[in-house]
Amino acid sequence: MVKAVVGANWGDEGKGKITDMMAANADIIVRFQGGANAGHTIVNNYGKFALHTLPSGVFYGHTTSIIGNGVALNIPILINEINSIVEKGVPAPKILVSDRAQIVMPYHILFDQYEEERLGKASFGSTKSGIAPFYSDKYAKIGYQVQELFDEDLLKEKVVRTCDQKNVLLEHLYHKPLLTPEELLDTLHEYRDMIAPYVCDTSAFLWNALKENKTILLEGQLGTLKDPDHGIYPMVTSSSTLAPYGCIGAGIPAQELKQVVTVCKAYSSAVGAGAFVSEIFGDEADELRRRGGDGGEFGATTGRPRRMGWFDCVASKYGCRMQGTTDVAFTVVDVLGYLDEIPVCVGYEIDGEVTTDFPVTSKLEKAKPVLKTLPGWKCDIRGIKKYEDLPENCRTYIEFIEKEIGFPITMISNGPSRDDIIYR
Ligand code: GDP
């Protein structure tokens, strides 16, 4: 059986915590898209970790962690991450890397920086991890698949072609130092030696696991609104963040996906540029940012302050719909305990008309939030284990949002740890 944990919004919904928790009952956890540009923060008995490439299941002895074919694989970052968790006392995880995954090359990272520099004020707010240049090359069919590292004749010839192609842009568009085939080949040899112990046909491995009735967890990165097709294009990421894509990015049959847990945060946050209708500013935002998440709403990879906003029912209803949600996990509810009243965005006003349907980007830019204010519960709800024991105003908040988004909230997260969870 295959389950997915994905985000409804702009990312940072707390997917890492939910995956880590659900991994207790899973055999295999798969990363299926994205790269080391975003991170998951996980708090468990070994400490606090920010993972960028490893799936959130690496802390359990019983799980296999897979880097699927859909991932933008940064080999040195992966190896550093494995070493860093082992150094902190976590038992060496079982990790498999798809022989069809493609490799983030050092020049992808450079091109990402150079392009943001060139765009200046019009930049995308990229994390400069090379993800957009990487996926561009993948679909332009000039990327490097992991399996190619083991074909020396192919590599020798391909590095020349790569340098010819990239150097045109380096010289004439960016005015930066050129690449040489020798240097590139050396890098690829280093990558080959680093990754060799982990490489296999992961889709065959997963197929066999399915035949043995194993439980597979697909771990998404970012959220619906960052999907290149269904998100706030062009302020999106470069690979699909949707659960159905998990089947492609892992290499498993789509009909095996039985449960889609979409993670929604009790308020909103976003990183990077782009329309954010329920955004708040000033002291109100600072306070929520400071109290948010586990130690404040700052990027796990970049440390940048996140943009803050009230819960957005319009974006979340759409976000859940596009994921094919079976369950909503509603997170960081504990953070809102300080507020007397909690505004919620229940509609968008666009050109004088109110809608609850999430619009295309050009209309989104014009949208103004329609807010409804709900009473706060003014207490700390951490440690509560039963839904009935939550304060009435807290249950009212949850049930109001459930009705607005139209998908069942079956899990409520009231703290950062694995067992801060209320099942409903
Ligand atoms: P992800 O990328 O979706 O995994 O999300 P992040 O890791 O960026 O952000 C989630 C942050 O909130 C992390 O610091 C988590 O430890 C923390 N967190 C997750 N769930 C809860 C919760 O229910 N309450 C609180 N206070 N923090 C939470």
Image (spheres, rainbow, N blue to C red):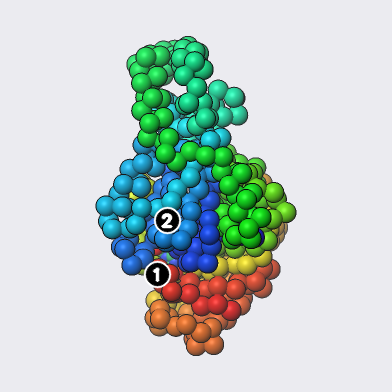
- Residue 239: x and y in percent read 57, 41
Report the image quarter containing ligand 1: bottom left
Observer-nearest of 46 and 416: 46
Q: What amino acid type is highlighted by mark number 1?
A: Ser
10 vs 111: above or below: below
For the image shown, how many numbered marks are present on the structure?
2
201 vs 375: above or below: above
**Residue 388 located left or right of residue 339:** right
- The residue indicated by pointer 2 is 58
State the quadrant of the N terminus: bottom right
State the quadrant of the C terminus: bottom right
**Residue 345 located left or right of residue 301:** right
Q: Is residue 397 visible?
A: no
- The residue indicated by pointer 1 is 417
197 vs 7: above or below: above
- Residue 211: x and y in percent read 66, 55
- Residue 392: x and y in percent read 53, 86
Observer-nearest of 37 and 204: 204
- Residue 371: x and y in percent read 57, 67
| Residue ID at (46%, 61%) | 62
| Residue ID at (43%, 74%) | 419
Q: What amino acid type is highlighted by mark number 2?
A: Val
Q: Secondary structure at mark 2?
A: loop
275 vs 281: above or below: above
Q: Is residue 89 visible?
A: yes
| Residue ID at (51%, 78%) | 422
